[in-house]
Amino acid sequence: MEDKFARRMSSVHRSFIREILKVTADPSIISFAGGLPNPECFPYEAISEAARRALADKPVNALQYSTTEGDPELRAWIAERYFTRMGLRLEPDDILITTGSQQCVDLVAKVFLDKGDAVVLERPAYLGAIQSFSVFEPTFRTIPLHTDGPDLAALESLLDQGPAKLFYAVPNFQNPSGMSYSLEKRQAVAELCLRRDLLFVEDDPYGELRFKGEHLPSVYTFTKGRSILMGSFSKIATPGFRIGWIVASGGVRDALIRVKQASDLHTPSLTQRIMIELLKHYDMDAHIAMIRERYGKQSRVMVDAIQRHFPEGVTISDPEGGMFLWVTLPEGYSSMKLIDKAVERKVAFVPGKPFYVEEGRGENTLRLNFSNASEEMIEEGVSRLGSALREFLGQ
Ligand SMILES: Cc1ncc(COP(=O)(O)O)c(C=O)c1O
């Protein structure tokens, strides 16, 4: 039957991360490879209580088909939170509930991309977005991501060479690099995208997870609504709910609703109702503060262990939030080769190469996840990786 596949399937590849996760199923391996939140941070009891409430008294609204837009109470909570977090005034009708923020990427691609359209990505870029966009056969163009955000001169010159439909970006604690945009870059990227008529698509599942520095407003606040903003409950509650959202209004919102309807009618009513009960009866601020503190500590433990165990010439990012740390090996060394040595020593990471769409880029980079390992495991895993690195680099 494979001979009947659509042509587009040849450009959609299996996620390399899923392949690595198979290796890390071995419990003796310390894995910094996945991108998972820490399950010790899941509010199990509060969710169980919220589920009981959501299902009490024959709840038609939790079990019946529902609207594509999503539950109005949930949309009202999200709109209110944007106001308290960053002074952004939104109506509940500006929010569309999605099945995780991964679905946002798919819906945006469906609405905006024709085959061959140019999509601008950060370099490196979120693998799940590369995969989602690939289904629609765009051409990818990339711009370097620096410690304060994207290289805007590179973006200008790329646009001088030809138009692009959209710029997909993760300005807060990016997956995979952990980098964040400075306030100045947020303003500048908004100005550039408006001036050059480039749709800015802002994916923000990690924004609430800042453990260092000052909280910064979304790029969306500087485009005055002329861009797209996405969010998710995956990293602040649990990913198992599969609830995310898109902020969009007018014709764009209408188009997104139409493609979502065609995809899955709506995000499950039951998980939306449970989430609402959780938000109403549980102290989410205290919960998110707990996650921030924990990830902050885990990130510090990892950075500190790296400073003691990694050899000269290997550099790392200094994440201010999120779940990832980015490692750069000296030029000429491939992390695709290092991974075998690391797995021999029972430690795993994700090589950087799959986060680059161009051949030959990112060979000497790798991603480490610090959210889903205890402090003891981080110390031990970094020590194992350090000895793999020393052997690999001949030091
Ligand atoms: C940048 C980015 N966007 C989207 C997602 C998907 O998240 P969700 O669980 O909300 O679908 C992830 C998941 O890791 C991510 O890192």
Image (tube, helix red, strand yellow):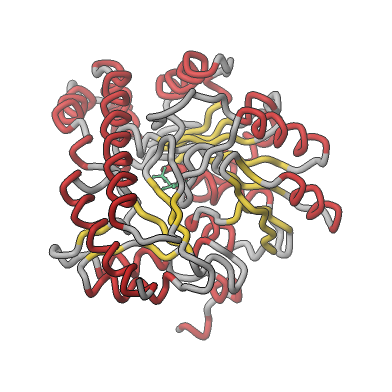
Q: Quadrant of the N terminus?
A: bottom left
Compared across the picture, whether 94 is left or right of 103 comes to right
**Residue at image location 47% in from the left, 40% down from the top:** 173
135 left or right of 340 in image: right
Quarter that holds the C terminus: bottom left
How many numbered callouts? 0
Kindly indicate the quadrant of the structure image that contains residue 191: top right
Residue 305 point in image, percent of width and height: 27, 49
Answer with the quarter of the image where residue 291 lies. Answer: top left
Against 10, residue 279 (above or below) is above
Q: Please provide percent x and percent y for residue 246.
A: 54, 35
Q: On the image, which quarter does residue 78 sit in?
A: top left
Q: Is residue 295 left or right of residue 117?
A: left
Q: Position of residue 310 (x, y in %)?
A: 33, 58
Position above or below: 38 against 32:
above
| 326 or 232, nearer to the observer | 326
What residue is rendered at 56% in x and 43% in y? 147
Which residue is pictured at 24% across the width and 19% down the height? Answer: 282
Instruction: Measuring from the top left, give residue 248's x and y in whole percent.
Output: 61, 31
Q: Is residue 73 left or right of residue 170?
A: left
Depth check, front residue: 123 or 259: 123
Is 81 above or below relative to 259? above
Q: Residue at x 32, y 41 (%)?
A: 299
Q: Nearer the viewer, residue 204 or 391?
A: 391
